[in-house]
Image: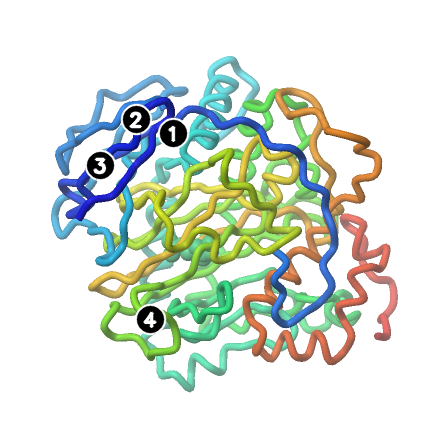
Amino acid sequence: MKISVRTTGLPLRQVAALPASRAVRLMGTAAHIVSPPPSPMAMPPRFNVQAAQDTRLRVQPPCSPPRQPAANTQPTTTPIPCQGGPTMPPGHRATTATLPTFHIPSVITPSPSNILLGQSIISAFRRDGIIQIAQSPLQKQLWSDTMAASKRFFAMSPEQKANCVDDQSYAGYIASGEEVTDGIADYSEIFTITKDFAADDARVKARWPCHGPVPWPEEGMKRVMTRYQEELGREGGRLVRLVEMGLGIEEGELGRWIGDRDGDNKGKEGSGGWHHARVLRFPPRNKTNGKGKEGRGIGSHTDYGLLVISAQDDVGGLFIRRPSGAEKFANWEKSAAGLREEEEGWVFVPPVRGTHTVILGDMMQYLTRNYLTATPHKVGLNTRERFAFAYFHEPSFQAVLKPLEGGIIPKPEGNSKQDKGVHYGTHFTNMFIRNYPDRITTKRLLAEGRYSLLERPELRTVGAVPAVETSV
Ligand SMILES: O=C(O)CCC(=O)C(=O)O
Ligand SMILES: [Fe+2]
């Protein structure tokens, strides 16, 4: 099979696509031109919301030896595992990424080497749309424990899994074929963890959209996944700080939208990012329930918040698109779901043990006026079942975001005072209504008129908590 790859400044090239072990691996493209700032808008509730180089081509052997350990600011190249190694899902056309691995210090001080590291991460995001970071020993353990818990959960009977649903939060089980991306059912089977509110929490009693408990199937899964999520919250906090340094903006300028500066949720009651996570299982491509599209695990989409930290087993299925000035989208205004799903230009992200990958969400794009762009991605079904984990590092549900100022953030075009900002809770709620039109949570949210609460001042003030039960 042949595919076309355009590299900046070079003519269209024809390269061999499969198998992955022989594929031409593409690394690096020139930074793209900054596109004009989008104007934000709050979407009304709808069931079918359709709102949303370097120039080298490097051929690498399948298992390249690791480079010598590099200085802190320089990512290292990690070998792709050979034994039972990953393959690109059949039927997909893409190049294969070889991502360098960044090593994130456990404490981020504004030292010259950390500033360089931040700048290097920003360049990598602008070039590749994704970075790979080394897992700490604790993270390796938590990933492995989470995978074990995930496999236990997905092996439960359909009835047991179907019981793990909450009608106020979107936490819990999502059956294969239940999630919808761009109007087509995804084959992913998922357990989502949103913030775990007690039923008598004031925000739940006040019927705030998406606020409710997590319907855990068992204590063991709750313990390990909560720990993993908290640990990635700290990693997210470190990455946010490095992004601030790389962008040359003041400490806390980005972090303040999250409500905590160091990512450990020490903020006052009600503050803290709307961080959430999910474990996913993808069936083998020949063992689906027929509700979706052949070979498609999750359709092309962007995620919603700031950063997504993910890990995958060694099967392979994730594809991303690099930033491109020619591909304009702003998912908080008009749906980016399904974006270029069947077109050329996808990059396969092979699993690399001992690493997380990090991609960017919609709000990072909005806050940076498109200097950084949300990373379009999709998942293909492979010949084996595949397990993955994604942690979403988010702004506060109550934050009304406004683009960042200073550093290398592009200046606004026109009158930025007219920019009403993006309320994260509204964007999140819109996305979940769109993805889960038939879920009990969506039906209850709309039936009870909860959506209109998103306009209330207390839902638009980071850290505010309802004093008394709100009637809707
Ligand atoms: O399976 C993966 O690697 C990515 C899943 C994903 O895109 C998501 O959970 O939003
Ligand atoms: Fe995603």
Camera-near label (4 vs 3) is: 3
The picture quadrant where one finds residue 407 is top right
Q: Position of residue 403 (x, y in %)?
A: 70, 35
Structural crowding at the residue carrying mark 3, measured as other residues with C-alpha within 10 Å and reported as few (<14), some (14–19) or many (≥20):
few
The tag earlier along the polypeptide, 4 or 2, is: 2
> Which one is nearer the viewer's eye here, 273 or 82?
82
Vertical relation: 378 (above or below) 440: above
The residue tagged 3 is 14
Camera-near label (3 vs 1) is: 3
Structural crowding at the residue carrying mark 4, measured as other residues with C-alpha within 10 Å and reported as few (<14), some (14–19) or many (≥20):
few
- Mark 2: amino acid: Thr
The residue most toward the front is 11
The tag earlier along the polypeptide, 3 or 1, is: 3
The residue most toward the top is 112
The residue tagged 1 is 103
Ligand 1 has an atom within 8 Å of the beta carbon of the residue at disc 2: no
Ligand 1 has an atom within 8 Å of the beta carbon of the residue at disc 4: no
- Residue at figure coordinates x 39%, y 83% from the top left: 158
Q: Are marks 2 and 3 in contact (CB under 8 Å)?
A: no
Mark pair 2, 3: CA separation: 28 Å
The tag earlier along the polypeptide, 4 or 3, is: 3
Provide the secondary structure element on which disc 2 rests: strand
- Mark 3: amino acid: Gln
The residue tagged 4 is 152
- Mark 4: amino acid: Arg
Q: Are marks 2 and 1 in contact (CB under 8 Å)?
A: yes
The residue tagged 2 is 76
> Which one is nearer the viewer's eye here, 339 or 436?
339
- Residue at figure coordinates x 36%, y 52% from the top left: 143
- Mark 1: amino acid: His
